[in-house]
Amino acid sequence: MDKIVVNGGRRLEGTVEVSGAKNAALPILASALLADGEHTFRNTPGLADVHTMLKLLRTMGCEAERLTEGPKGTVKVWTRPAITPEAPYELVKTMRASVLVLGPLVARHGRARVSLPGGCAIGSRPIDQHLKGLEAMGAEITLAEGYVEARAKRLRGATINFDMVTVTGTENVMMAAVLAEGRTVLENAAREPEVEELARVLTKMGARIQGAGTPVITIDGVASLKAVEDHVIVADRIEAGTLLVAAAITGGDVLVKHAVPEHLDAAIQKLREAGCRITAEPHGLRCVGPEVPRSVDITTSEHPGFPTDMQAQLMVLMAVADGTSIITENIFENRFMHVAELDRMGAHISIKGTTAVVKGVQRLSGAPVMATDLRASASLILAGLRAEGHTEVQRVYHLDRGYERLEEKLRSLGADAVRMKA
């Protein structure tokens, strides 16, 4: 098991490149199940979750591999007519996004058997909205022995109003609907950039989709789809946001290449309120951090609001800000588990229900800390960049699920951050 060791106090400067988006890559890889043939995806991040999805596709009968030659991050998936439509517990328990194969399998092969999902322990994330959508389109759903089983000769178009905004639910049902008979309308759909990215890929495959990125998505089903010859996966907005915070918390000057400004509007607004100077450059976003950040209040919400996946990172910045910040978490009920570790480093944070009160301090101190989930891992490394002394972040396998070589990217900007065996 690895750990990342950070010696703080260094100002970050330079240019760093953002990898492809994990939360776009996973549904895009699952969409390869919708069409036979050779699919090619570029800028696919080298992450543990991506490796798990490729392994899952292989267990179902696809050939899936990352190429060592050619354009960066090239992954090829060869989908065959004969597929084993099952996602076993051994894989799904390690990555909740494995459930994204459910919709494509039912739509393309008429049946699916998928284990109920696992993933980060950041709160209850049921798949009831996924099942609601599939049932509305005519699928027969049964739950047995920890598995979801779905069957349908051919799905039928329907109007589906999600009871809550769900990104993976929107993506799963959208993938099912592209091969359904007739028109499907998704209401209260997720508006995240990753949903738009998936729609772009499905459209390249021959799907007919309108409204992706808005609360209402309309899909007119087609009889069949074709393989994607080439698609470059969009840059990861959460990694980009994390690197902007790294610049901010060290008072640095960093150009984050490939960051898409409109994907980060809410986070950029808060960073500017905190005193950062952020400018759009021809190839990304540049952040110049303040000497002392100003406190700002943050409330997480669905896109285009402030993303829950950036809450932990902004909390670290607020931990060393001038003043008191109120951070309200509206998406996941257990997403303050990093607070106890930050307090061990000298932060002053109190929790009451879904609200954290962060009283800024002048200094953090390095300490051994333990990551509890993906974004918490990143927040502890950010804290280590600012802290005086030596910080050891344990259990960074969480980090590897969503960040590609983060410590190397920070080191290229001047950080003293190395990975070693725990």
Image (spheres, rainbow, N blue to C red):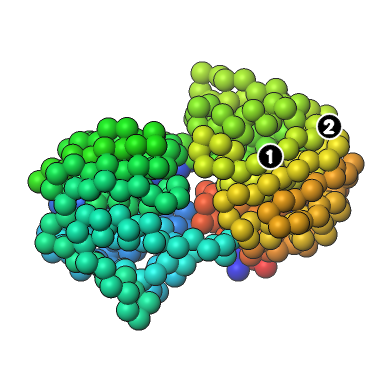
Taking the spot 40% from the left edge, 74% from the top edge, the residue there is 90
- Kind of element beneath mark 2: loop
Q: Position of residue 63 (x, y in %)?
A: 24, 59
Taking the spot 17% from the left edge, 55% from the top edge, the residue there is 155
- Mark 2 vs mark 1, CA separation in Å: 18 Å
Q: Is residue 123 above or below residue 249?
A: below
Taking the spot 54% from the left edge, 49% from the top edge, the residue there is 403
**Can residue 324 be seen here?**
yes
Residue topped by disc 1:
298
- In front: 46, or 80? 80
**Can residue 196 be seen here?**
no
Q: Is residue 114 above or below residue 10?
A: below
Query: In the displayed structure, does residue 82 sit left or right of residue 329?
Result: left
Query: In the displayed structure, does residue 366 sit left or right of residue 189?
Result: right
Badge 1: residue crowd in 10 Å (few <14, some 14–19, many ≥20)? many
Q: Choose top left, top right, bottom left or bottom right for residue 203.
A: top left
- Kind of element beneath mark 1: strand
Q: Nearer the viewer, mark 2 or mark 1?
A: 1
Q: Choose top left, top right, bottom left or bottom right for residue 273.
A: top right
Q: Choose top left, top right, bottom left or bottom right for residue 10.
A: top right
What is the three-letter code of the residue carrying label 1? Answer: Ile
What is the three-letter code of the residue carrying label 2? Answer: Val
Which numbered disc covers residue 292? 2
| Quadrant in which the C terminus appears | bottom right
Badge 2: residue crowd in 10 Å (few <14, some 14–19, many ≥20)? some
